[in-house]
Amino acid sequence: MFNFVQKRFKVLRIWKIGVQSVTGFEEQYRARTQKSFNMFQEASKYLPGGVAGNGKFIEPYPIYVRNARGARLWDIDGYEYTDLLMGAGVHILGHSPKVVLDAVKKQMEKGIHYYMPAEAEVKLGKKVCQLMSAIDMVRFVNTGTESTQMALRTARAYRKKDRIGKFEGNFHGQHDSVLISALSTAGEPNNLLPSIDSAGIPKAFAQDVLILPYNDIDGTLSSIRKDAKDLGAVIVEPVSAFGLGSIPADKEFLKAVREITIENDIPLIFDEVVTNFRLALGGAAEFFGVKPDLVCLGKILGGGFAIGGYGGRKDIMDKMVTPKTGLWDLKEQIFQSGCFSGNPITMTAGLVVLDELEKKNIYPRLNSITEKLQDGLIEIGEQFEYDMLVTGVSSILQIHFGIKDIRNKRDAMKANKAMAKTFHLGLRAKGIMASAHPLFLSTEHTEKDVNHILEVTEIVLKEMQSFN
Ligand code: PMP
């Protein structure tokens, strides 16, 4: 008990240091990012927040990138960074792998975008179906957001039910049905209520969303049971990345969700936008040994270019998505199209990356190097007696402060966000590109990079203390 109290006290003390140290790291950051600051001021006149997406707005202002290669980024001030964001988890083979550049250059000579289908789309579709056991047929779209939007539309059409079950703290992109209880909470822990995460989302959307407790088997089963006859789908992130902080689901939990959805004939959707081809070639379904009915795809699948995709059981995809001859029956089937969907550049890049992943069995080394980084971070955290928590799985990781364990959104909200912000600012001020976002390693990261990240971490934590 005494130890526990003592440790808590330390956390509080360090939190104070963390807030003060913003100034120290901010000074260092500003000193080396003058050109980024100037560009930010210019950008802010034309782009809200100086960026194309809130996620890229990192305080006090973002670093503007000049170029990237392998595991590195260079900013417009000329500074080099060891990159841990890796295009938000896109670049599993590092930035701009030569095989992708060569294939894309060749494709560009043949055309950039046709609107009509081409061979690359067929090849990538076939490859995805071969690699992912839950996918018999697949449609390509342009973002992860579209993936979850269309997978949910498909499932709702199949079940002829509007209501969906989604887990608190699971992020599925930014369309109106899912930006609910992804970033915020409402209700009591034993009675979760939908919480709209963005201005502009009509309240009516929340009425059709049942909010479920992540990693809580009993709570989830009883909620699904009560609502089963109204549910068109249950969607889950097998590893809850952006919303929870890189927290994997328990295998037993996913199994229980699978069983109850089978019992009630509710399509189960895995949102694998982050996990596809990251946890394993067969994604989370292979990794956890749980097979969903539909799967949402994105990120790695596009080989560095914008992509999304959704697919799954042939009977569902065929019935709901395959256009029938003559007029489409949009009373029974879904509408889904897209000017850039399946464009040959993205398809070519995606195919090259999947071929590489298939040929090279990259996962054992990539996972072990990530584990080395995680272990090192934990060790340094303990050395400084910081309550530093490192979460993640495979080559996904995230660093939290002021909390010992995170299993759901309620836990995640108790973490010390101010301290995490300070720490990550310190890393960026010293050449490690990281933020309070899921972090990713690639095959281009070396043991030397891991050691370098650990050395910088130690310096940052030491400085956080000395700012006191
Ligand atoms: N699903 C998950 C699990 C995600 O993490 C994200 C975004 N990172 C999305 C969907 C949305 O993808 P996009 O940003 O490509 O729309």
Image: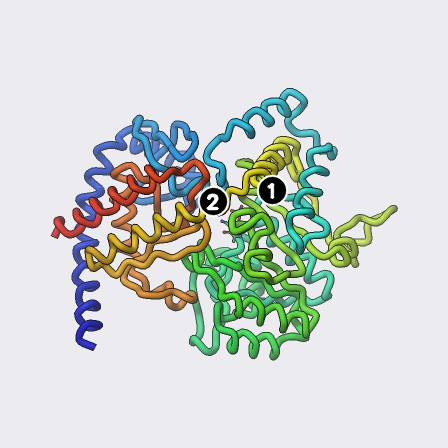
Of 109 and 98, which appears nearest the observer?
Answer: 98
In the picture of the structure, the residue carrying the numbered disc 2 is 89
Q: Amino acid at mark 2?
A: Gly
Q: Which residue is mark 1?
A: 142
Beta carbon of the mark 2 residue lies under 8 A of ligand 1: yes
Q: Residue at x 20, y 59 (%)?
A: 385
Q: Quadrant of residue 53?
A: top left
Question: Mark 1 near ligand 1 (CB under 8 Å)?
Answer: no
Residue 275 or residue 334, whichever sits in front? 275
| 231 relative to 42 in the view: left or right | right
Question: Taking 335 as reference, is 121 above or below it?
Answer: above
Q: Secondary structure at mark 1?
A: loop
Can you tell which mark lies on residue 98?
none
Is residue 409 depicted above or below 417 in this figure? below
Q: Is residue 196 visible?
A: no
Spatial CA span between label 2 and label 1: 16 Å
Name the residue: 67% across, 60% down: 293
Please state which of the two labelled residues, at mark 2 or mark 1, is closer to the viewer: 2
The answer to whether residue 464 is above or below residue 258 is above
Taking the view exactly as shown, the residue that stands out farthest to the top is 109
- Identify the mark nearer the N-term, 2 or 1: 2
Secondary structure at badge 2 equals helix
Q: Position of residue 223 (x, y in %)?
A: 56, 76
* Amino acid beneath label 1: Asn
The total number of labels drawn is 2
Residue 393 lies, in percent from the top left, at 44, 55
Q: Report whether residue 256 is seen.
A: yes
**Is 76 left, or right, of 141 in this rendering?**
left
